[in-house]
Image (cartoon, rainbow, N blue to C red):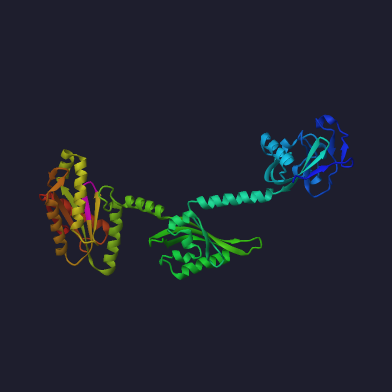
Amino acid sequence: MLKTFNFHKAFLCRSSRDTQHFTGRKYYCCSLDKDSLEITYVIHVDTKIVVDATHAFLKLLKYDVEDLGNFSIYDIIGAEVEEVNANIHKIVNHGLLEIGLRQYWCKDGQMLYVGSSFKVAQRDSEKYLMITLRDITELQQMRIRLQLALQVFEHASDGILVTDIKGIIQYVNPAFAMHTGYSMDEIVGKTPGILKSGRHQEEFYQDIWNSLHTDGQWRGEIINKRKNGEHYSEWVVIDAVKNELGKVTMYCGIFRDLSERMKYEEKIRFHAYHDGLTGLPNRILFYEKINQCLALAKRYHHMMAVMYVDLDGFKHVNDNLGHDKGDLLLKAVADRLKECVRESDIVARMGGDEFTLILPEVAKSADVEIVAAKIKKQLNQAFELLGCTVTISSSIGISFYPTDGEDVDSLVKKADNAMYQAKASGKNAYRFSDQA
């Protein structure tokens, strides 16, 4: 039931101010305890003018006593006029006693959040509305910040995991669930150990905890395991979260899946060191590999062979059948060369129609001669290139470590010279360096 007060003369008095400020009324409320801690103000129901207020109200909204009578409820409530009028009608005529959240504007333009409760006062035909506010600005701002934080948490592309001080998982965001394959129900209540890949020693994880206890943070790369057993690399930042007393209450980890980045970097690395057409190691990787193989040959005192292969008749194919057929021929040659050697041997494309092979460890020169004969036979067989039958041959030069040289340049140069000797002798042949 709406609570209505009938004012007597002690509660209402005539205004000593110019009554033009209060059009349509003769009285204003002066019975408020101005020093009350309540944030209360009074409006005239018909004019909506603010006619009285406690000091607490004036202080909160940054008005002066002299401002009373010079501003209306429309100036301070952040709502449309129609909405304000509708609420006042509900309060006065239907007993609405409280509104939970409302935006109020201070005199300087600052916005506050308040809750409101109401009392209606009446003398004769004049009605007044006494409104008491509860300032919930700080609470509302905290709620807004929490909502924003939750939105960030829920929509972040990085995985986020929260544990208690014992390391028991309390919450994960959707990105974490997507990256790991575990649902919220499957992982909450477990420890991050569920993600262990077995690729790190226990000392690695102990170092993480030591850093959290001493520094409050750990960051680094971890190889974890998804639910399906797949290993993947992550960049992880873990923070110890403290309360206002400085006591650790939880741990928060942010996980960035590096799998796609690593795939991209691997692709960049591959193209930097491999021939774009055949996929074979290019000149750069060839020299890197031959240096490694030579170092091992010197260390373990075994023989190593280098082979230089040049295609006979490739220019004719390229010029007469087109570069597309030439490219197909080079790719087919690369495949046949790989079939002629062991898995431990290395086939590279130096450029154009020139290929090199490294045989890191051979027992005797006769073993390499068998490989050369196999290559010669393979490349003499016809190639089918989009309906065209093509026949070519090869000229092959061979050098050995240590008999033909003890450094890379010497071995490559002597194999190259031997290849030119094979070509000069009529092509479709192989030559050892000591035959050149």
| Relative image position of residue 325 (x, y in whole percent) | 19, 42
| Vertical placement of residue 24 versus 63, above or below | above
| Residue 85 lies within the magenta run | no
**Left-right relation of 346 to 269:** left
Question: Residue farthest to the left?
Answer: 426
| Vertical placement of residue 279 versus 124, above or below | below
Name the residue located 63 percent from the left edge and 64 percent from the top edge: 247
Q: Quadrant of residue 25?
A: top right
Name the residue located 89 percent from the left edge and 42 percent from the top edge: 10
Q: Quadrant of residue 126?
A: top right
Of residues 290 and 274, which is closer to you in this image?
Answer: 274
Number of labels in the image equals 0
Name the residue located 26 percent from the left edge and 56 percent from the top edge: 409
Of residues 390 and 247, which is closer to you in this image?
Answer: 247
Of residues 244 and 19, which is closer to you in this image?
Answer: 19
Could you tell me if residue 429 is visible in this image? yes
| Relative image position of residue 96 (x, y in whole percent) | 71, 44
Question: Residue farthest to the bottom?
Answer: 202
Could you tell me if residue 161 is visible in this image? no
Q: Which residues are magenta?
A: 351-356
| Relative image position of residue 30 (x, y in whole percent) | 85, 41
**Left-right relation of 140 to 379:** right
Dominant secondary structure, magenta:
strand
| Relative image position of residue 286 (x, y in whole percent) | 28, 55
User: Which of the image's four quarters has the C terminus?
Assistant: bottom left
**Left-right relation of 137 to 195:** right
